[in-house]
Image (cartoon, rainbow, N blue to C red):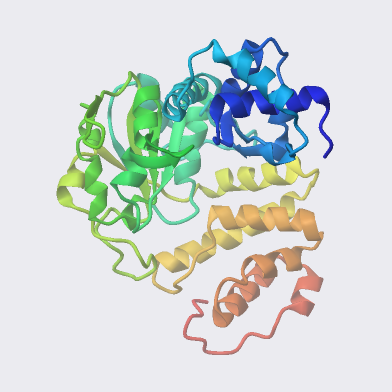
Amino acid sequence: MALTDLQRQHLEVLKSKHGDTEILSKKVIFDTIKDEGFKPPYWLTSSDKREKRGYFRIPYDLLDDTVSDKDLKKVAKSVASKPPVSKKVVVEKTKEVETEVVNKAISFIPEVDKDYVQFGNYKHISNIIKSKIFYPVFISGLSGNGKTFSVEQACAKLKREMVRVNITIETDEDDLLGGFRLVNGETVFHAGPVVDAMERGAILLLDEVDLASNKILALQPVLEGKGVYLKKINKWIKPAEGFNVIATANTKGKGSESGAFIGTNILNEAFLERFAITLEQEYPPVATEGKIVRNVFTSHGIEDDDFAKNLVDWADIIRKTYDDGGTDEVISTRRLVHIANAYKIFGDKKTAIDLCIARFDEDTKVTFNELYTKIDADPVLIEETVEVVEDLDTTPF
């Protein structure tokens, strides 16, 4: 890239002012250049130079050895009257600016999903969030039955910010509360999502909390609603009005006896005791679930009420069999939505079903397929369905 005289002057000013610091924030770049009487150098903040949000790599390598001593002296003279800015001051200044921009410009309010249908514990969740009272809630239930989605959509409708943290066995205090990060050659403290939620007065959603190890106990004071002490920076964080904690899990924190949810752990009793109530989430009623599937169809321009009804009836029978111990698998509401989307993509009912139940073992797939053909009297499905092997151990029918 050949530099224009103006672009070369921009680079020379930045190099004279900030030395070997190659990554600078947009504000520092613009302020430095404007202080020398130039207009904002937008070419230095183009997407190809972006290092991370708000920071850009300065292409000093475009400067060659043909710069004359006269030019260098001119630049040096123009900045000599101003006190030098150390790298540390630049980092601290840009860190403060970045924090201010993030707090004001980024909204954590989820988007409203027009296809969402309220059911189950939605009203309880909505009332708790609306109250702005600190009242930690634990929501348990089988996978894919709308636990997380209901919290998200309640926040979306009430225009409340939500910070979601997906918990794993590796999640620790540093991930939750924050820790030191290397920024622009300096070590600075970066607040974690829990601190962000507290300061914003947002809803903190701890998703899949029963996968956590005992490191989750770092949240004990947070669950008391009194604030948390960040010992790494000797600072006390108090929650803003409206802050609350909602946790979702497949179990109630007592482990999974059936083995269906491998990796879930037995959570500390003192941790669980800090949740005011536990909401048990069930799959939606048949009528409600039918509306959910039809809404997905409608969003894709599909009108097929019979297929929607058959899918919901099929899932309902399988779940009742699961409750009776006749099968180890279920068709979740989430999987019905997957099938509805697959129907739009592939344009064929059998293909949509087959691809979306392929995650199950072979015996279960055959059994589920056979059941669907009995519900949907479509000749094509019956003709193409694999013959069911008799006396399958997993066959509940």
Q: How many marks?
A: 0
- Residue 352 sits in quarter: bottom right
Q: Position of residue 79 (x, y in %)?
A: 59, 15
- Residue 266 sits in quarter: bottom left
Residue under the point 15% across and 46% down: 270
Of 125 and 29, nearer the camera is: 29
Residue under the point 20% across and 26% down: 226
Q: Position of residue 236 (x, y in %)?
A: 23, 26
Specify whether 344 is left or right of 229.
right
Most extreme residue toward the front, as rendered?
Answer: 69
Of 112 and 162, nearer the camera is: 162
- Residue 59 sits in quarter: top right
Q: Position of residue 287 (x, y in %)?
A: 57, 45
Image position of 131 with respect to 245: above or below: above
Specify whether 344 is left or right of 217.
right
Residue 344 in view in this figure = yes
Of 274 and 315, nearer the camera is: 274
Q: Position of residue 242 (x, y in %)?
A: 35, 21
Most extreme residue toward the left, as rendered?
Answer: 270
Residue under the point 49% across and 19% down: 84
Residue under the point 35% across and 65% down: 263
Image position of 171 with respect to 151: above or below: below
